[in-house]
Amino acid sequence: MPFSPVPSEIKPVAHLMKLADEHDQRNVVVAYWARMAACRLALKMVPGKKSPEFTTLLNEILNWLEKAKEEHRSNEGICSETTAQALIEEYALNLFSHAEKQDAAEIFNKNTVKLFYTAGMLFDVLEQFGLSEDLHEKQKYAKWKAAYIHNCLKSGEKPQPGPPNSGNEENNMVHISELPEEEQLRLLEEKRRLQEEQDRKRREEEEELNRLSNFAGNNTPGAAGNMPGLNNDGFQFPKYSPISPNIPQQPGSITPSTPQASGPTTPAPSGPTTYNLPTPTNYGMPPNTQIQLTTEQIQRAQKLTKYATSALNYDDVKTAVENLQKALNLLQFGKE
């Protein structure tokens, strides 16, 4: 369906709407979540009173989202944010990788620009789920590279492959004033939003440190069960961690190893040190039963492991464990 023009007060939303239009026929998951991201960004940019043009476009997007979700209710990429995140991330990384290969081979044309630019916009869509530091760096690089190659082709200069050369960054970098007005507005809005997010995280980290400091001063050893951020069995899910926790390939427990050191023995930390994964059910089947898996079951198990990997990228251990357990049950017993 055709949508009304994007009002000037939410002009940065236009690139998300265009991305959705380009994927309506070939990837409904991208089209759906691109319009969802456009809707969320628009509401964030104009939290108060909205113009009639804004309201008209917003209603059109919401109606389309509702209709699409009904038509594709069996599509996990539409109904599940975790699945959508995994699928769009894989698609974005594939485009980014292909663009980098063309860049390394010094193939500089409109198609190379389009690959980098589309990858950058897909990372924009992924922002609504949260971006890891690695993906955020790829997001910035893809957008810079698209603008850099575009401006070189426009001016007749030969682009240089790879990131900016050491010592020549000023010559290779594209100043924001050289970009189209729409892109300038979007980048300025992104910069403001990222600063707000960094300030919010810093405040949360300071509050967490204060709570931990108060706990250390007011509680006795062995009271780990009462420590803020721990659940009843003492396992703590990290709030901000650059490293995803390791999950064993077979059900069992994770036991932290203690480094060997000379000198007096250091007392072991109080509180539980293991996290037991749930034992898979055998659905009443005799031990060592051999089953024949179908192609669909194997593909489903592959998807479940992908969802688990994606969840671990954002420290969502619970979702990762659930998906890994389903995959294990499917491979062993033919049922999730």
Image (spheres, rainbow, N blue to C red):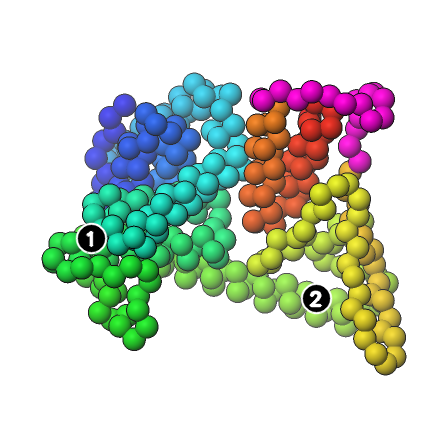
Q: 300 left or right of 96?
A: right
Q: 153 left or right of 320?
A: left
Extreme residue toward the front, this view: 105
Q: Could you tell me which quadrant the N terminus lies in?
A: top left
Q: Is residue 87 above or below residue 294?
A: below
SS category of the residue bearing label 1:
helix
Q: 191 left or right of 263?
A: left
Disc 2 marks a residue whose amino acid type is Leu
At horizontal 80% and vertical 65% (from top left) the residue drawn is 258
At horizontal 49% and vertical 24% (from top left) the residue drawn is 75
The image's mark for residue 212 is: 2
SS category of the residue bearing label 2:
helix
Pinpoint residue 154: horizontal percent, then vertical percent. 13, 54
The residue range painted magenta reads 279-296
Tell me which numbered mark, 2 or 1, is placed earlier along the sequence: 1
Tell me, yes or no, whether the highlighted magenta stretch contains residue 153. no
Pinpoint residue 195: horizontal percent, then vertical percent. 41, 62
The residue where tag 1 is placed is: 150
Pinpoint residue 215: horizontal percent, then vertical percent. 75, 66
Cα–Cα span, label 2 and label 1: 50 Å
